[in-house]
Amino acid sequence: MTGKEAQQPEELPVVFVHRRPSFILPFGDHLRSQFHVLDPYESPEPYDSFLARHAPSIRALMTMGPTLVSAEFLDRLPVLELIVATSAGLDHIDLPACRSRGIVVTNASSAFAEDAADCAVGLLIDVLRRISAADRFVRGRMWPVKETYPLGFKLGGKRVGIVGLGSIGSEVAKRLSAFGCTIAYTARNKKQSVPIPFYANVRDLAANSDVLVLCCALTKETYHFVNKDVMVVLGKEGVIINVGRGSLINEKELVQCLVGGEIGGAGLDVYENEPNVPKELFGLDNVVLSPHSAPATPESFEAVLQLTVGNLKAFFSNKPLVSVVSNE
Ligand SMILES: O=CC(=O)O
């Protein structure tokens, strides 16, 4: 045994695990071997007194999935310096409150990027080539009855507009270029080092694309920024893929546009009111639905574990963090 392994949990750096009661910590053992993990749902003590008793020692917090980190919650942690998020999106965290307190936030989008991008591409191919609908056709014994199945659309040659060229969007771009698509993007800022055509806003991007792939953060600026106007300019054969957040799209208008044939199809992993999905979508064969599972693989969870532990270790040894989010 090394000296380190012999340390008692109380001697290890304290990490508070912030989670919903039903959200089980998938990598607890690994975390416990290196940190003194405080998980209020593992203690018989009531949540509030557990939190109040430990608050003076909580400098680092790990927030699991979409567990809300509100300004009120942050007020209960007066010495908090670091929030390590296990998610790519940070819309559940009050970033302005963190900023005003000087609390640093890290995310996990680089760990999820490849799997989320694979899923985005999978949804797109599925919508264009009607794979899920074809599966239903065969299983429903329709093949002997109808003999022919509607044609799909070719992926190669499509003009794909990527909304948000961060780690996930960049992986989508890489994959769809290899399929022979032409790529353009919009983002908060033009990336000087990226040779991909840039549009200053999502409407202009849509007007010049056959497909929009949403991989950006949900913020005040991006809330509902894909609205009916954007969908109409995308066009009747246009396809929207969303692996970002449901509220990037005005979902009511999306449903209207899909039902009314104003756009050609959609592949959705995220929704405005999860786990509720508009029932109008269930009968549409040009829509493919998945349950907010785009980045969920054992491989990406392992990568998240490495990333979060890397951030925590760096913090406690005063080294640069691995995936700090710019919070300006
Ligand atoms: O949606 C998943 C995430 O933000 O990690």
Image: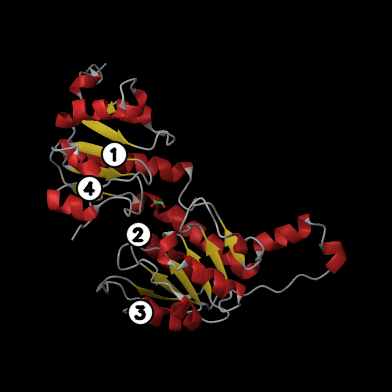
Residue bearing mark 2: 167
| Res 179 visible | no
Crowd band around label 4 with a 10 angstrom C-alpha radius: few (<14), some (14–19), many (20+): some
Q: Which residue is mark 3?
A: 197
Asked whether mark 3 lies closer than 8 Å to ligand 1, one says no
Q: Write the residue at 33% across / 46% down.
A: 68
Q: Judging from the image, what secondary structure is the residue with disc 1 in? A: strand
Q: Earlier in the sequence, mark 4 or mark 3?
A: 4
Q: Amino acid at mark 3?
A: Pro
Q: Any mark on residue 178, and which?
A: none
- CA distance separating discs 4 and 3: 39 Å
Please tell me whether residue 59 is drawn above or below residue 231 in the rendered image. Answer: above
Nearest the viewer among 210 and 318 is: 210
Q: Are marks 4 and 2 in contact (CB under 8 Å)?
A: no
| Residue 124 in view (yes/no) | yes
- Name the disc covering residue 71, or none: 4
Image coords of residue 172 (percent x, y):
44, 64
Nearer the N terminus, badge 4 or badge 1?
A: 1
